Image (tube, rainbow, N blue to C red):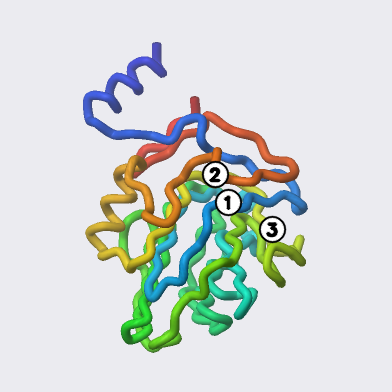
Amino acid sequence: MQWFAILSTLLSLGIPFTGGKTLVLTSTDTFVRVLRPIPAMAAVTACLWVKTSPPGTKATLVSYAASTHHNEFVMDPAASLMLYVKGTQLSADLNVADGQWHHVCATWSSNGGSWAYYDNGAVFRTGSGLRSGDTITGGGIITLGQEQDEVGGKLDPTQALIGSITGFNLWSRALSSDEVAAVFNDCSIGGDVFSWDLSDLQITGDVTRSSDGVCGTFSLLL
């Protein structure tokens, strides 16, 4: 009855959730690879929901490796997030390794090298001058929960995510702050390059599918 009451409330508010689409990664040799082709991009936004276990982990959230650089676009480590674009590192000092659900987004644009990090729909830090005028090389591989030291390989177990992920989406443009807030509140909004779909992922290792659903400010344990 309690769950039915919660579900009825969510439906009445029109708030979607990602029940049944959460992946739980439980070992350091686990990885989740995006199977969709990645185009060259002059701007990018990557968003995902993540919950680390244990807290304080140095886990990688998103690693995109291409022929030009194995750190073509990287979001890591969870305990003090940095952004890498074409191997250039920028510290945002955002800690999401606290064992709680976080919706994390990073944006970057070739125009002025502008970048931003968002936590739970709100701007955390912004800046500019990061690889201004460059382009993200296409044809590489995105791995979630692991850091690649070559395209598709040389995964570093010390940077592996032990925890849960869901709702990874990728856009070929830098979303505005209003758009990021909308994605945080509505899990049905997907990216134009990749929209969260387990059928478009290669899931390897100790990964289970969970009915732990989350969207916006709601976190449900079914």
The location of residue 135, given as percent across then percent down, is: 44, 79
Instruction: Give me the residue at 51% from left, 30% from top.
Output: 20
Looking at the picture, does residue 88 appear above or below residue 139?
A: below
Looking at the picture, does residue 52 appear above or below residue 94?
A: above
Q: Which residue is mark 3?
A: 160
Left or right of 166, for residue 52: right
Quarter in which the N terminus is drawn: top left
Instruction: Give me the residue at 43% from left, 38% from top.
Output: 214
Q: Is residue 112 visible?
A: yes
Q: CA distance from mark 2 to mark 1?
A: 5 Å
Dot 2: element = helix
Q: Which residue is mark 1?
A: 35
Three-letter code for the amino acid on which mark 3 is drawn? Ala
Q: Nearer the viewer, residue 66 or 106?
A: 66
Q: Which residue is mark 2?
A: 200
Q: Are marks 2 and 1 in contact (CB under 8 Å)?
A: yes
Q: Nearer the viewer, residue 83 or 119?
A: 83
